[in-house]
Image (cartoon, helix red, strand yellow):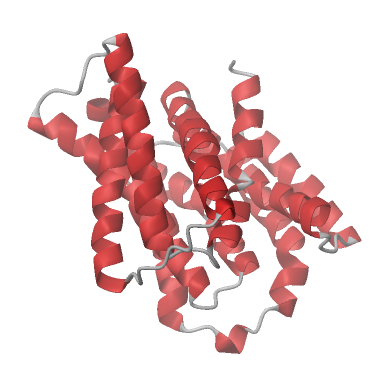
Amino acid sequence: MHALAPVLFVLIWSTGFLAGRGVASHADPFWFLALRFACVAAAFIGAALWVRAAWPRGVRRIAMHLLAGALMSGLYLGPSWWAMSKGLAAGIMSLIGALQPLFTALLAVVVLGRRLSPGTWAGLALGFGGVGLVLLPRLQAADASALSLPVVLVAAGSIFSLTVGSMVQKSPLAAGDDLRSASAVQNIGAVLVLLAMAGVVGQPHWDNSAALWGYLAFSVLVLSIGGATLLIWLMRQGEATRTTALLLAVPPLSALQAWFIFGETLSAIQLVGFVVAIAGVALARR
């Protein structure tokens, strides 16, 4: 499981942009995400009740789980999907997302007082550079002049939210509880945040198509119950920087999937970037 989980997580997480790309024309992202995490919360509530798992006790412990879910799911996906709906290219969003392992490393050093080896820093830098090479054609095709500073800041803020949420996930008040009951509470936190954002800036839109329900099922079962649970499990098993370094492999795999599924071009520089990014991930996780 320790050997398979990182590979499985990257494969699942790299499909996330496919769901976001498909949902955009069928439903409002905030309402879609709120329903998605409500379904995930219901599934984990059922699983926790089925195995009679212990539930988080105490106001501080419950509040920590709600905060982790609000940060890692609600304030991460909601604003990032909103930024892309406002014209932020998926390639630029992926490049901003690749900053997350660097944010995690900086917080680990500055806030938690941890020391990272030179190899870890070199691996993170190498991985980010590889991501840049993979996304270079998309970045060159994007119209940078059409981007507004608020949209870019919101996108960066969503990645920082995921970073802080990962740290909260590692805190003693959150890391010791049963994964099923803890995930139920955390997804409720995500729903509360997304409903608030949907009420403020959302636009009720749901075409009720079979494709939309298919995206919802995929998002609930694969991305959330599968991918997000694996991320939490990996965070509990290992050091935060080593775990989030896996996210550097997501944009290259997404580019490969876009080439295979949508017929997008894949140039030599992107293939080189793929190799460089994977090498950086391996170095950072040593």
Image vertical order of residue 149 relative to residue 203, above or below: below
Horizontal relation, residue 268 to residue 133: left or right:
right
The image quarter containing residue 160 is bottom left
Q: Which residue corresponds to the image point at 32% horizontal and 10% vertical from the top-left?
A: 51
Q: Which residue corresponds to the image point at 45% horizontal and 35% vertical from the top-left?
A: 240
Image vertical order of residue 119 relative to residue 133, above or below: above
Q: Which residue corresponds to the image point at 34% horizontal and 56% vertical from the top-left?
A: 75
Horizontal relation, residue 286 to residue 49: left or right:
right
Residue 167 spot, x, y in % from top left:
35, 40
Q: Which residue corresponds to the image point at 46% horizontal and 62% vertical from the top-left?
A: 80
**243 or 207, nearer to the observer:** 207
Horizontal relation, residue 226 to residue 189: left or right:
right
How many tags in the picture?
0
In the rendered image, the quadrant that contains the N terminus is top right
Residue placed furthest toward the right: 268
Residue 40 spot, x, y in % from top left:
38, 36
**204 or 152, nearer to the observer:** 204
Residue 17 spot, x, y in % from top left:
60, 55
The image quarter containing residue 28 is bottom left
Image vertical order of residue 144 relative to residue 66, above or below: below
